[in-house]
Image (tube, rainbow, N blue to C red):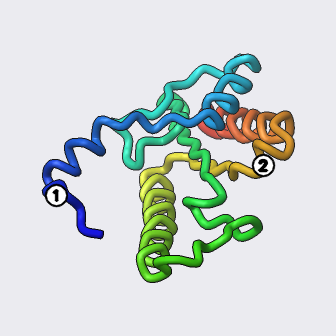
Amino acid sequence: MADIMSKEQRSKTMSKIKAKSKLEDMFASALWRKGLRFRRNVRSLKGTPDIAIKKYKIVIFVDSCFWHVCPEHFKRPKSNEEFWDKKFKRNVERDREISEYYAGINWHVKRVWEHEIRGDIDKAVEDTMEFVNMVKILEKT
C-alpha cells in the first residue's frame, strides 16, 4: 500500500513522535531511584540516546527485541518479508553505525536488551550502574 503523505509530510509527522516507551520509563525510573542522574532522549546527540550523561560521555540505548533483532527472541514477520527484511537490516546497521560513532569520539555506549529488563530489572540496573561507575573512574584518570 502506497503512503498517502508526501515524503516531507511524513517526515514532519514522524518528527513529532516522542520516543519514549513504558519499558524505557520503567528502566530509567529504577536507575533514578538508585541515584543516577541523566537526561532522557537527548535529541542533540546522534541517535537520540534513551539515557545520556554528557559529563561522563555516556549514552545508553534500550533496544527492543523486535525492532533491533535480538539474537535470542527475534521473530521475523511472515508477511511482507522483503519490506521487513530491509527494515530490520537498516535498524541493525544504524545501531552499529551509532555505536561506532560514539566509540570514535571516545564516548561510552551501553546497549540494554528489552529481555534483560523484563527478565530481571534489578540485574539490568545493577549492570548499568556498574558500567557507569567504571566509566566515572576512567574519566577521572
Q: Which numbered disc, 2 or 1, marks the residue closer to the eye?
A: 1
Residue closer to the observer: 82 or 125: 82
Report the residue at 61% width, 60% height from top. Answer: 66
Q: Which residue is mark 1?
A: 7
Residue closer to the observer: 13 or 15: 13
Mark 2 lies on a secondary structure that is helix
Q: Position of residue 88 (x, y in %)?
A: 50, 70
Q: Position of residue 41 (x, y in %)?
A: 45, 34
The amino acid on which the numbered mark 2 sits, given as a three-letter code, is Glu
Label 1 near label 2: C-beta < 8 Å?
Answer: no
| Number of numbered callouts drawn | 2
The amino acid on which the numbered mark 1 sits, given as a three-letter code, is Lys
Mark 1 lies on a secondary structure that is helix
Q: Which residue is mark 2?
A: 116
- The C terminus sits in image quarter: top right
Residue 11 position (above or below residue 59) = below
Mark sitting earlier along the chain (2/1): 1
Q: Is residue 42 visible?
A: yes
Report the residue at 67% width, 20% height from top. Answer: 32
Disc 1 crowd, CA 10 A, few/some/many (<14, 14-19, 20+): few
Rendered image quadrant of residue 120 = top right
Left or right position of 47 against 133: left
Report the residue at 16% width, 58% height from top. Answer: 7
Residue closer to the observer: 80 or 51: 80
Rendered image quadrant of residue 60 = top right
Q: Position of residue 64 (x, y in %)?
A: 62, 53
- The N terminus sits in image quarter: bottom left
Q: Position of residue 24 (x, y in %)?
A: 61, 35
Rendered image quadrant of residue 133 = top right
Report the residue at 51% width, 34% height from top. Answer: 20
Q: Is residue 141 visible?
A: no
Residue 45 position (above or below residue 75) = above
